[in-house]
Image (cartoon, rainbow, N blue to C red):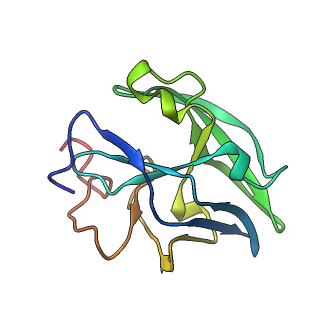
Amino acid sequence: MWDYPRPPALEPERRRVRIELGGVTIVDSTAALRVLETSHPPTIYVPAGDVRAGVLSPGRGRSLCEWKGQATYLDVGAGGRHEERAAWTYRAPVKRYAALRDHVCFYPSRMGACWLGDERVAAQEGDFYGGWITPDVRGPFKGGPGTRGW
């Protein structure tokens, strides 16, 4: 992932994406996109239509990505669990990343479990980046203590 590009690349995710929260499958998608950015594990964006109805609600705040534009945060709730700011979306991404419109990215650290294909995902360290780590992705990764300024 240190050879991932800047600006980030956007490409189809070929593996099936599944996400659980509170023991409930909230995402099952074969149409996800992934963003590849230097020093980060991939982030996975699923079409909003592949997210179980009723699990997303508006969250607090926004952030600005220098590449993709303004992100809006979402709360996620299912199976008796409620996770604040556990996902985000780009409602009006910049032109280069227009394909991200109507897609949602989830923080694996705030979900019960996330899978790419049959591999369970490990979460990127920290509370800002939402990378999905699988055995084929090698670090070190930005996000842990002392790495924000890399």
Work out whether residue 90 or residue 47 is closer to the camera in this orientation and state it: 47
* Residue 29 in the figure: left or right of residue 45: right
Screen quadrant of the N terminus:
bottom left
Task: Identify the residue shown where x is 30% and y is 40%.
Answer: 9
Task: Identify the residue shown where x is 43% and y is 46%.
Answer: 128
Q: Which residue is at the far left? A: 3
Task: Identify the residue shown where x is 67% and y is 41%.
Answer: 74
> Horizontal and vertical percent for residue 97?
43, 29
* Residue 53 in the figure: left or right of residue 10: right
Give the answer, above or below, for where 63 lies relative to 34: above
Q: How many marks?
A: 0
Q: Quadrant of residue 134?
A: bottom left
Task: Identify the residue shown where x is 22% and y is 65%.
Answer: 139
Q: Quadrant of residue 89?
A: top right
Work out whether residue 92 or residue 141 is closer to the camera in this orientation and state it: 92
Work out whether residue 141 or residue 38 is closer to the camera in this orientation and state it: 38
Give the answer, above or below, for where 88 lies relative to 43: above
Give the answer, above or below, for where 95 lies relative to 16: above
